Image (cartoon, coloured by chain):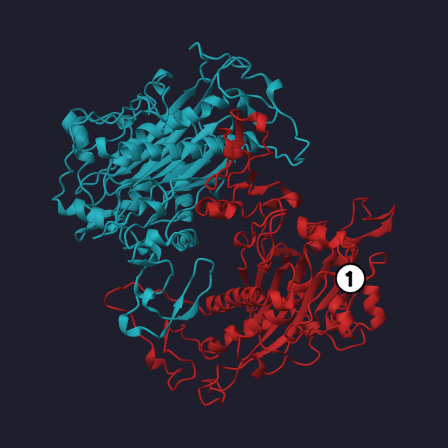
Chain colours: A cyan, B red
Amino acid sequence: MLTRVRSAVAHLVSSGGAPPPRPKSPDLPSATAAPPAAAPEAPKSPPARPGSGSRAPAKTAEARASFSRPTFLQLSPGGLRRADDHAGRAVQSPPDTGRRLPWSTGYAEVINAGKSRHNEDQACCEVVYVEGRRSISGAPRESSRGQGLCFYYWGLFDGHAGGGAAEMACRLLHRHVQEQLKDLVDILQDPSPPPLCLPSTPGTPGFSDRSHLVGPQPCWSLQKEVSHESLVIGAIENAFQLMDEQMARERRGHQVEGGCCALVVVYLLGKVYVANAGDSRAIIVRNGEIIPMSREFTPETERQRLQLLGFLKPELLGSEFTHLEFPRRIQPKELGQRMLYRDQNMTGWAYKKIELEDLRFPLVSGEGKKARVMATIGVTRGLGDHNLKVCSSTLPIKPFLSCFPEVQVYDLTQYEHCPDDVLVLGTDGLWDVTNDCEVAATVDRVLSAYEPNDPSRYTALAQALVLGARGTPRDRGWHLPNNKLGSGDDISVFVIPLGGPGSYS
Amino acid sequence: MLTRVRSAVAHLVSSGGAPPPRPKSPDLPSATAAPPAAAPEAPKSPPARPGSGSRAPAKTAEARASFSRPTFLQLSPGGLRRADDHAGRAVQSPPDTGRRLPWSTGYAEVINAGKSRHNEDQACCEVVYVEGRRSISGAPRESSRGQGLCFYYWGLFDGHAGGGAAEMACRLLHRHVQEQLKDLVDILQDPSPPPLCLPSTPGTPGFSDRSHLVGPQPCWSLQKEVSHESLVIGAIENAFQLMDEQMARERRGHQVEGGCCALVVVYLLGKVYVANAGDSRAIIVRNGEIIPMSREFTPETERQRLQLLGFLKPELLGSEFTHLEFPRRIQPKELGQRMLYRDQNMTGWAYKKIELEDLRFPLVSGEGKKARVMATIGVTRGLGDHNLKVCSSTLPIKPFLSCFPEVQVYDLTQYEHCPDDVLVLGTDGLWDVTNDCEVAATVDRVLSAYEPNDPSRYTALAQALVLGARGTPRDRGWHLPNNKLGSGDDISVFVIPLGGPGSYS
């Protein structure tokens, strides 16, 4: 996330690059600890499979307070320093000798060119087991199929204005997903439609007894059938919300600085769920064809939602902003003239007479990478940002940001995938300087240079994508072969094979 | 619009089919009269080209008060009675002998099977001249190109809960479009980008002087370029809003009963603008390919907008509704159990413990044609409905309805059209029983049976589409050849040739 939060990044940079002081309160809960309150049972659930990439702090407590990288990178203290070097910008990947990531997932990352002290992207790859909700007696509830559920999970978290939110989301978001799925273990494995109503307490006798389900009501003949798929989507959506609420609760004690975009993939029961809140992007490249799996959420794509909120809740704008959009800042001397504007209901533009209120700064301004909400932030969905204020003001920006992801579903069973079919996830550091077609061309070029059953091909592809976006150093900058500027942002890429040598059990 | 407004239609039917009494206040403004206040200069603008289809009342004042049909149908008093006959449901089209509609547009309509006393659809086809805004002296402003603009206009208005709103929109909406375009006459004909800022008063000296345009501001380097196309979109959007406001102002004096969906096409300077507010639909069939030109706005497609409004403004829900969606009505005895729900941020479903507030009726309920806002109305955009209340309540529904259309643009110059390429507009009476593919097949079948230069082929196509949706009477109902039920709703269809013998001057 490059220069998309003006004030906070400015603060970070102006403080000489040193990380902000951390309080001596207890550390953030570790990846295997429970999200408190919101997910009280998490400590009792089985830990993630060892070696699957759960995050851990860097070697010393001091180093951890400064920065951390995914444990699946298996970085030594020296490796950590090299990963943190803005001058060299060495591409980092899991070692070829170690245990592979699930599905032989490829991963590569590189630190930014100096816009923030540390790499504020984080990455997570986990295999998570979900046991059904426990009964009152504490014994695991007997599932109708006698077993829990397992999901595969990948997450990219692109932090801004500090690394705290991205680190916390990286450690805990999959635990929230796990928690949300606990009530659904039986339901998702039962081919009949999900019950609309359940008894009050999970784990009480008869909880899984279908005779409790209430049929169509005589007083309201309308009854919707809800799919299994939409329950998983709802679980992921609520996991994002609970993660965000946890950040709000713990932001003082643990200094969860900043916010982060979150791009998450959950593979469960044959389907791939891609959840995106922010401006990272996921695409599937299948037999050369590009299938977009996410949309970016920016002040431009969410203009009407933002304006509507400002219109309905003008108190959120203070006396500094107007919910109307203007194509440029209005000068006081232009009062009474007529300016182009867009209201929250409009996609077109029209002229209006400039009144005193129109001299306020527009809630949404700029375009492309320079588009901003309240002149401050360039992304409109994500986690955290609870302390984010308008520059030189006490006006909070969080009310305009949404923590809810958009979830797209891809049924892996509907197509016979070959080893060259991949799901590519990248933070905006990748997509700022490339596009879907170029990425698809790189997929073809790199994968065809390796044997189909060589599991290292996906890491090689991730490295090629990161290198292609970073470029090479020249004339005090990073440049691409076409002489354009390379990305100076943190860049992180997952390459998930859909028909490769991975395990889909 | 069949049975999509429960309470109001019930009132109409229970009153024995007689139209509600009309006050003796002055008639609604005629098609050539100005929309008062909102468009004060309309009387001075040139009338629509004669014979182009401007609406007029039926022959006598009494008949007019009862119902009216488009004047371009040239119905005699006997013809009006036949058009109003629910038993015969004769298909109506402009006579083949009369002056053709612009572009040789085809049109056909049929009355409903008894759901309302009269046909509540209305149709309009006009050629409208736009003169630049007059100067203070009253003389027409000198245009930089020395001439005004001409636009072609087609509108379908599907009324509900009375015919008043549809009739008024049919007579006046194009006048509002004309009014909104007056300031743009010069700007749209000038190939340079539209000025962002204009002097205060249209018509003052220097109004069209480009030297008044302010360049990029040093204090805000961001400046958006606004396209000519988006100015036309903005003009159409504001015309819809002003039409709706006029209905609100005049609803008491003139008894503008009910509301209407509005589907409008404006052809201007080489581009076709399709504006839709409601559940009518427009598609282009081009060389057999289907190009959707509108989206339907229903409680299902607009669920999240509606829920967000209810969430942010709970006072709009009274004590009767909840903004949460449930898949069926909850019984009081289910308090404390856990029910599936969707909040405004969710696309998936999750379980929640049922609390007392959840026993309220959901703001959005049902699915498909039975989806409703506040258990009352099945369409969420349109004009009018200012008096619409929840059944047996004083709670207004209008705050949840939007009068703003979605505008899609089709550049007619980007493709060489043949006489078989058409834009088809239909009210939901057509689309309830057919789909895009079947309509495209009918386009192919009917047009291929006529010579390409036979202008009557488009009316024949419109008739075939209406007949195909109505079906034939059998067993006290209307049936299609596949034994499914035909549409019992009012059905209206325009077929606009894109490369036919029409005039595009």
Q: Quadrant where the C terminus of chain B lies? A: bottom right
Taking the image as shown, residue A409 lies to the left or right of residue A163, namely right
Determine if residue B390 is in view.
yes
In the image, residue A425 sits, relative to residue A6, either above or below, namely above
The percent position of residue A411, horizontal first and vertical second, equals 53, 33
Q: Residue at x 68, y 70 (%)?
A: B500
Which residue in the structure is indicated by mark 1?
B463
Q: In the current view of this chain or complex, which residue is farthest to the right?
A: B475
Q: Quadrant where the N terminus of chain B lies? A: bottom right
The percent position of residue B83, horizontal first and vertical second, equals 81, 64
The mark tally for this picture is 1
Output the chain of dot 1. Answer: B
Taking the image as shown, residue A318 lies to the left or right of residue A199, namely left
In the image, residue A104 sits, relative to residue B14, either above or below, namely above
Give the camera-side residue of B493 and B412: B493
Give the camera-side residue of B334 and A167: B334
